[in-house]
Amino acid sequence: MNSPEAWLTRFFRFVRACIVGSGATLVDFSVLTTCIRVAGIAPTSARIPALLAGASVQFFGNRTYTFRARAGRIGRQAKLFVCAEVVTLALNYGVFHYLATRVHFAPPEVVSFAGTFIVFVTFAYPVRRLVIFKVPSDDVQ
């Protein structure tokens, strides 16, 4: 059941998710830094538009590149993504707020990156993989 091809397929899918996530993080980071450093918005408030911008990149990147789920109904995927992303955004915000109020030695951008990665690995990727952009199993005949 666990053939090398299946393992490689999963591995490369995760690598693609990390690439998309990196792009989304770059957008997120850019918006967050601009809001904080240019617009003078408080870090906890600036986190919201940054998360929304990153989420947009995540949806389209995951749909077309990571999971190659273009054959799926975009309306269904978008609804599921929005529902899961509400939870993801809340987790990201909560983890960021928790860390930002306790980790005073690191810049808010670094704290944001750490929190986002924790949420990505423990919640966002599994939900996107297993629910939103579910890829049919190679074992199904």
Image (tube, grey):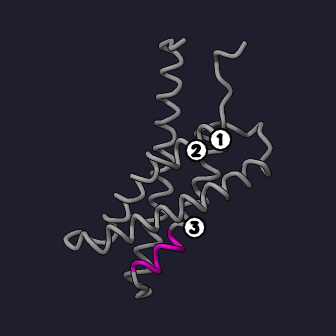
Give x and y (percent) for residue 30. Answer: 44, 68
Amino acid type of the residue tagged 2 in the rendering: Val
Residue that carries the numbered disc 2 in the rendered image:
127
Quadrant in the rendering for residue 34? bottom left
Helix or strand or loop: what does disc 1 sit on? helix
Residue that carries the numbered disc 3 in the rendered image:
52
Quarter of the image with the C terminus is top right
Amino acid type of the residue tagged 1 in the rendering: Val
Helix or strand or loop: what does disc 3 sit on? helix
What are the residue bounds of the magenta stretch? 43-50
Residue that carries the numbered disc 1 in the rendered image:
131
Q: In the image, is residue 109 above or below residue 124? A: below
Contact between marks 2 and 1 (CB within 8 A): the answer is yes
Q: In the image, is residue 103 above or below residue 114? A: below
Helix or strand or loop: what does disc 2 sit on? helix
Amino acid type of the residue tagged 3 in the rendering: Leu
Q: Nearer the viewer, mark 3 or mark 2?
A: 2
Image side of residue 81 versus residue 116, left or right: right
Q: CA distance from mark 2 to mark 1?
A: 5 Å
| Nearer-N-terminus badge (3/2) | 3
| Nearer-N-terminus badge (3/1) | 3
Residue in view at x 50 percent, y 14 percent = 2
